[in-house]
Each structure stands twice: as C-alpha cells, then as structure tokens.
Amino acid sequence: MDEAMIEMHHVFKTYPSQISALSDVTLEIFPGEFTFIAGPSGSGKSTLVRILFCAEKPTSGEVVVHGMHINQPGFKKIYQLRKKMGIVSQDFKLLKDRTVNENVAFALEVTGHTREEAKWKASEILKRVGLEEREGDPILSLSAGEQQRVAIARALVHSPSLLLADEPTGNLDAKMTLSVMNLLTDLHQKGTTIVFATQYTGLIKRYSYRIIQILNGQIWDGRKADVNKMNKVEEVKAGG
Amino acid sequence: MTFFLQYVMRRTFQNMMGNLFPNLITIGIIAISMLIFSTFTLLAYNLTNFLKIWEDKIEVIAYLKRGTPSGEVEPLLDKTRLLEGVEVVRYVSPYDAMAFMETKLGRQKNLLQGIQPAVLPPSFEIQLKKEYRNSTKIKEVVTHLKKIPQLEEIQYGQEWVETFSVLVHILRLTQWILGGLLLIAVVFITSNTLQLTISSRREEIEVMQWVGASPAFIRVPFYMEGLIQGLLGGGLAILFLFLMHQGLFLNLPPSMQAWLAKIPVLFLPLETIVWILLGGMVLGFFGSSVASMRVLKYK
C-alpha cells in the first residue's frame, strides 16, 4: 500500500477559551482518496482542515502532510507545503478588483512564474473548469457557483496532488453544488487527493467516498455504509 | 533574480499607487524630519569648517619678561622650538613690534609718535603643528610654555577658541538628540503608513499565503516601499535644503553678501548627502520591517 499522504496521530486542539475542537484524532488519508470530513457546524471539521494547511497548530499530537512533520517546533516551510496543496473555502477568497484570469494567474505570479506564463497556465486551467468563456470578465460578474469554480481553478493551477476544501459548496444552491461536485469528482478521477469538509449529509450520501465523521472533536471513520451510524451520532447530539 | 526584481518593483508600484495619499503624507513627513536634521547638519558643518579655518590661523604669542638679556633669547628660541607641537618660532623684538604696529595703523601711524619701541615687550610668535591647532592640544603647548620662567604672558585667543568649540559641540549634540527623536518619529510614521497599505492589501496577502507565496514574495515589496519612501523623503529634504541655501544668498542685502563673501558658507558635501539619503532609506526600511513583523506573519 502507498504511504499515507496525510497522517494525524493523537491530535488534540484546545482553544484558549478551553473549547476542545479536536480530541485524540488519529487518521490516515492515502493518495488518490476522496474523503469527506463530515459533521455539524462547530464540530471541529474546519479546525481539522486548518491544521492540515498549517493555518492552526494542534495543541498536541503529530501531523504529517506530504512527509512533512508540520507541527514540529520551528517548522518554517509552510509555503513549500502549500505549493503542494490547493485550498478552497466557502467564501472563495477571490480578489474582487481583478478578472477571472488575473485571479488564477495571481497564484502563479506570486510563486515565481512570469506574467506571461501565469496568464497562459491560468487560461488552460480555466478551460478545465469550464470557464474559458469568462476569463476576461470581472470576478463580481460571475455567479457564486462560477466564483467557486474560479477558486478551485486557482487552487489547482499549481497542479497540486492534494486539494483541501472547507465547505466549498456552503454558499451554493443545489444546481451550483452539483456543478462543483462534478468538477471535484472529475479531478479525483484524474488522481487528485481530495479532502472535503461539509455539514451536508445529503450531499455525502450521493457519493460512495470515504467519510470521516467528526462530532465534538472526535472522529468516526468509515465508508458510505457508516452514514447511518453518522446520522445516529448527530441524533444523539441533537437529543442533548 | 531579474524576474523577482521586476515582480517586486511592480508590486511596490501597485501598493504605492493604491495608497497614494498616505504614501505622499509619509514622504512629506520624512522630508520635513530629514530637513530639520539636515539643517542642523549643515549648520554644524559650516561652523566646524569655520572653526577649522580659524584654528589654522591660530598662533601663540609668548611675551618675554622685560629686561630679559638678549644673550638668553637665542637659547630660549631653541628651547621653545623643541617643545612638542611647535612648528615655527619667530622672535619679535620691540622694534619689530613697533614696525608691525605702524604697518597696521597705516595713515594713522602718527598716533605712535613719541612712543619708544622699548615700551613694547619682545615676544615669540609660535606657529603650531596642524594637529595642535585646536582648543585641547593648544593648551598642552601653553602648559609647557608656562613652565619657562622668562616668559611673562601667553596669549592665544583662548576664549574665542573655547566659546566657539562649545558652540559647535552644542550644535552637534542638538543635531544628534533631534536626529534621535526624529528617527523614532520617522520609524513610527513609516510603519503606520505601511500598516495601512498592508491592511488595504490584506485579502491579497491572505491569498498569497494560501497559494504558497514565499515570505520574500510577500514582504520584500513592502520593504521596498519603505526604502522608496525614505529615499524620496531624504531626497526632498536635500532639495529643500539646497534651495534654502541658495535662497539665503539671493535674498540677502548686498552689504551682508559682501560680509558673507569672506566666510565660505558651504553646502553639504556629497558624502554627507549620500549618508542622509541612506539614512532615510534605512529609516524607511526599519519602519516597514516593524510593520511587517507585526502584521505579515505567515498564517
């Protein structure tokens, strides 16, 4: 079996307000996997994703991504790690004063590519996400679903082997959600490892991908068959 | 490397144009601060220069006791010549002194009629070596001269030298105290403007961090902005100082111009100008470093 792309061993995350976001999380994600991190709002899934891209540090435990021990003291290569991964979030984080192409090309320009090369590569990736017709348009003229596609294109422009998506369909309607999911499925089929954090169980049930359920900072790992168990966990939480 | 520099210059220009007003204000404040510092530097430079010219002309006059036998003059001259710091010693007899006074008085030399040369004391005119022509070293020579019993009085315009030296010292001290205060102000102002720039670019910076831009790609344009602000501020200060320096001569009444013509009022030498410009750049850079340390942490 391949070496795991992501490893978390006994990871705890407690915020200064003593809120425990993750509690003894241990998991492995292998290259080529599509993994849902599922759980209700405030369950700790965003914390888990943020730890994976070094936006937060765990309180204790070990985290290895792409072979880098990212929570070791003195780890300064965050930018090198991020070049190997793409990040997509619910709020897109696009630059409003730029065009579609400029938003995608920006990711390359600031990582050492020439403007011409960046522009050309951005065009190529925009074709892949079906936005070749819109590349000269201002970003605010796009629908939310299209903006999320631009964000995905920007995340993919480095050809990362890992894509971390934190509620990427959170602001999208059903049609746009489906369009983004189709794009991610296509990427997964072409070999990209995807970690997809979401609170929508209805969305997860439609796909036969691995599910890591997270609730009160603890995880239950499983495949599609475990969705029922996951629902039970949610029911327990709802019941108090 | 060329690509990186092009990138840095492009981003710096975008940042500065995107925050033109705060940038202009910062450059203006740096210019004013540097102008105050440069003005004191220019004053101190000219006074030091004036002091040097004056010191170069300094000589010590040692008056011999009346009645010193003429046979003792030559050995005394030799003894004085051997003192440390003494370059040339000339004996001025009462007759020489009288002749000197007549020359000085010119047409009014008849005022000296009836005065015998013998009333004038013989003296030694002592020229000092260059390194001894300052208020501290001159005192060393005078101390040695005072030990010679045949010498009655020693004059070297000590009050002038001391007062002038104190003035120059006070000016230099003010220059550096003021410079220190302005330095803190400039760093504070630059760092605050850059925080404005950084905060207006927060979204961009966040995206840069997300996509894995190296810290150099994120920070160097802001450092460059600080450097440019400092350079432009310093440059403007030098320009204003130069215009003030030129204006001083153009707008003075002719009588004062004639008087000033005897004293060279110099502009700052190139080396000092370069130091002031570099100082401005260092301050700007330091201000931007402080700002980026506070807000550009990789998240």
Image: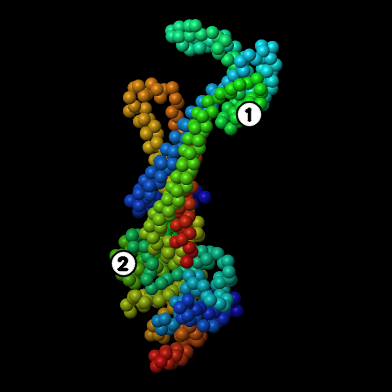
> In the figure, is residue B284 to the left or right of B85?
left
Residue B64's tag is: none
Going by the numbered disc 2, the residue's amino acid type is Leu
Would you identify the image quadrant in which residue B247 lies? top left
Would you identify the image quadrant in which residue B194 lies? bottom left
* Element type at mark 2: loop
Up/down of B199 relative to B260, above or below: below
Going by the numbered disc 1, the residue's amino acid type is Thr
Q: Badge 1: few (under 14), some or many (20 or more) residues near its Cα, within 10 Å?
A: few
The chain letter under disc 1 is B
Q: Are marks 2 and 1 on the same chain?
A: no
Q: Residue at x 39, y 54 (%)?
A: B193
Q: Nearer the viewer, residue B146 or A72?
A: B146
Would you identify the image quadrant in which residue B65 lies? top right
Q: Residue at x 38, y 69 (%)?
A: A92
Q: Nearer the viewer, residue A175 or A237?
A: A237
The chain letter under disc 2 is A
Dot 2 and dot 1 residues touching (CB under 8 Å): no
Number of numbered labels in the structure image: 2
Q: Position of residue B163 (x, y in %)?
A: 49, 32
Q: Position of residue B188 (x, y in %)?
A: 43, 53
**Residue carrying label 1:** B143
- Does residue B67 appear anywhere in the picture? yes
Of badges 2 and 1, the one in the foreground is: 1
- Does residue B270 appear anywhere in the picture? no
Q: Position of residue A71 (x, y in %)?
A: 56, 72
Q: Position of residue B221 (x, y in %)?
A: 45, 53
Up/down of A216 relative to B185, above or below: below
**Residue carrying label 2:** A142
